[in-house]
């Protein structure tokens, strides 16, 4: 039976269309980065086209593009790039970018980007407010398996000035020459007509109650902020963006135990900096938020006694449920190993008199965000997160600890020193670790990558109940050593006690 004539014609038409598409002078046309963008005057719209070499390429209604030398394209021909600096008064609202290629034989071809571009009007600021309990700012657009590098969490209903967008990240103007990025699902855009966020500071107060020390700074609206916990001397530094000082006094009332000297600096016209010195060398955490429009910093005090008895220690067994984690050659699963070690650690800590809070005590799926919120509510004294490591190289092995904030490094250092006593080789004590459970500032925290499940020797140890118990014992000793070291006087006390220079 022959092919019906109509079907034959359709097949021939498809072949001709495919051939024409393969011969099209333009193969690809895109914005760089290839994502929806919002740009403001002064920003650069960057585009790239791949097409027939030796042609004339333009975009955005006649803006020229340059054909790159093969030396810049790994030998590829027909790569064109162009840049346009957005000017005041330019208008473009979520439009595809049009490209045009004129070949040497006067063949003209038009193509469009897959992503849209919007030019923002500086006379009509786009504002947004943060939403949810875990809104955060990123430093930039970088991404890896841990996400973008985070600047820190923000309270809800903080007003942000949005002056750009790339993909699902809004660019935030914090201050002159200072920006950050916020995920679009962490904010709610406001209707047009608002003014750029800003406030004068009122005179502020510093006081303590039976549990915490507090700093309260009145503002007229909720402004974004960034905090750093620094050492030598230990101090908490908080930048409030959009704030200008009208602080004429700082009232320090009775009851302070964690805070020492406090003062402020106007580091630039729209950045107000609080500098809060701590009386103790080891910080035990802090939180920042708003009570109405009053910026409130709550500083945690050291435990009354520096031993495990009576302390609340959070133990996090990494992964769980559908999140298996790494898997070893013999099939050992990270979620099972971390739970087994965490349960042994819980029993060891309870034997020492500590109250233990487990983020999971069974094979359950628990989102890291939910873990953080639960820990925020429980407010433990310390957190240890248990994981096992993995590498594409089966020869890599050893133990390691991780911290994010330099002020919490002593905790990870103390645990690392004890983990080395298990006989495992050292893989390192890693800082600035951008992992969710290391992000909170409310309590000292550390993550332990006990050993490499991808290494056969380490996997054998990880699956051994005796070695799991050994690791739990050494982590407990690490916590004990951390507490013992934290009994030492703060830097000021040490300076007053050291011998005078000869």
Image (cartoon, rainbow, N blue to C red):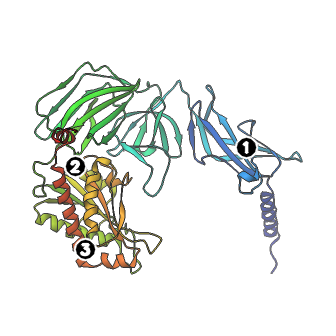
- Location of residue 463 by image quarter: bottom left
SS of the residue under disc 1: strand
Residue depicted at 40% across the width and 46% down the height: 150
Image: 71 above or below 157: below
Q: Which mark is residue 468?
A: 3
Q: How far across and how far down the image is residue 405, in percent?
A: 32, 48
Q: Earlier in the sequence, mark 3 or mark 2?
A: 2
Residue depicted at 74% across the width and 56% down the height: 76
Q: In the rendered image, is residue 316 in sight?
A: no
In this rendered view, identify the residue nearer to me: 405 or 209: 405
Q: Which residue is mark 2?
A: 377
Q: How far across and how far down the image is residue 246, in percent?
A: 31, 19
Disc 1/disc 3 C-alpha distance (Å): 62 Å
Residue depicted at 10% across the width and 55% down the height: 310
In this rendered view, identify the residue nearer to me: 37 or 191: 37
Disc 3/disc 2 C-alpha distance (Å): 30 Å
Q: Which mark is residue 409?
A: none
Q: How far across and how far down the image is residue 233, in percent?
A: 26, 39
Instruction: Find the residue positioned furthest to the right.
Output: 105
Q: Which residue is mark 1?
A: 99
């Amino acid at each position: 039976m022959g092919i019906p004539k109509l079907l034959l014609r359709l097949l021939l038409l498809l072949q001709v269309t495919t051939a024409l598409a393969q011969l099209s002078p333009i193969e690809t046309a895109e914005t760089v980065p290839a994502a929806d963008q919002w740009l403001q005057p002064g920003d650069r719209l960057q585009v790239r086209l791949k097409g027939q070499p030796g042609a004339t390429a333009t975009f955005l209604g006649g803006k020229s593009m340059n054909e790159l030398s093969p030396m810049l394209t790994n030998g590829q021909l027909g790569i064109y790039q162009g840049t346009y600096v957005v000017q005041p008064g330019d208008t473009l609202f979520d439009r595809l970018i049009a490209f045009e290629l004129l070949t040497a034989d006067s063949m003209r071809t038009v193509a469009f980007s897959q992503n849209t571009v919007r030019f923002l009007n500086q006379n009509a600021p786009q504002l947004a407010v943060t939403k949810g309990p875990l809104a955060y700012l990123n430093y930039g657009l970088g991404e890896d398996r841990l996400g973008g590098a985070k600047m820190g969490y923000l309270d809800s209903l903080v007003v942000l000035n949005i002056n750009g967008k790339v993909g699902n990240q809004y660019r935030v103007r914090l201050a002159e020459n200072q920006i950050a990025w916020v995920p679009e699902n962490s904010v709610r855009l406001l209707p047009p007509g608002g003014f750029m966020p800003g406030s004068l500071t009122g005179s502020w107060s510093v006081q303590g109650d039976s549990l915490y020390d507090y700093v309260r700074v009145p503002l007229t609206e909720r402004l974004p902020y960034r905090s750093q916990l620094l050492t030598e001397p230990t101090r908490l530094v908080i930048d409030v963006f959009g704030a200008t000082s009208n602080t004429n006094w700082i009232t320090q009332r009775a009851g302070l135990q964690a805070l020492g000297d406090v003062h402020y600096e106007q580091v630039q016209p729209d950045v107000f900096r609080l500098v809060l010195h701590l009386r103790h060398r080891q910080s035990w955490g802090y939180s920042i938020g708003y009570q109405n429009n009053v910026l409130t910093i709550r500083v945690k005090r050291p435990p009354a006694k520096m031993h495990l008895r009576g302390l609340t220690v959070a133990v996090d067994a990494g992964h769980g449920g559908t999140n298996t984690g790494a898997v070893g050659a013999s099939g050992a699963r990270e979620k099972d190993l971390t739970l087994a070690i965490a349960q042994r650690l819980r029993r060891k800590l309870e034997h020492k008199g500590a109250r233990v809070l487990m983020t999971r005590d069974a094979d359950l799926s628990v989102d890291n965000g939910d873990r953080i919120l639960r820990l925020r509510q429980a407010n433990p004294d310390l957190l240890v997160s248990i994981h096992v490591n993995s590498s594409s190289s089966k020869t890599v092995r050893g133990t390691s600890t991780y911290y994010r904030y330099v002020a919490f490094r002593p905790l990870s250092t103390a645990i690392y020193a004890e983990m080395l006593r298990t006989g495992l080789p050292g893989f390192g004590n890693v800082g600035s670790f951008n992992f969710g459970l290391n992000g909170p500032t409310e309590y000292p925290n550390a993550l332990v990558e006990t050993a490499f499940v991808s290494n056969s020797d380490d996997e054998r140890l990880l699956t051994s109940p005796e070695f799991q118990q050994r690791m739990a014992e050494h982590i407990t000793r690490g916590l004990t050593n951390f507490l013992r070291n934290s009994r030492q006087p703060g830097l000021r006390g040490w300076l007053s006690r050291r011998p005078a220079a000869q």
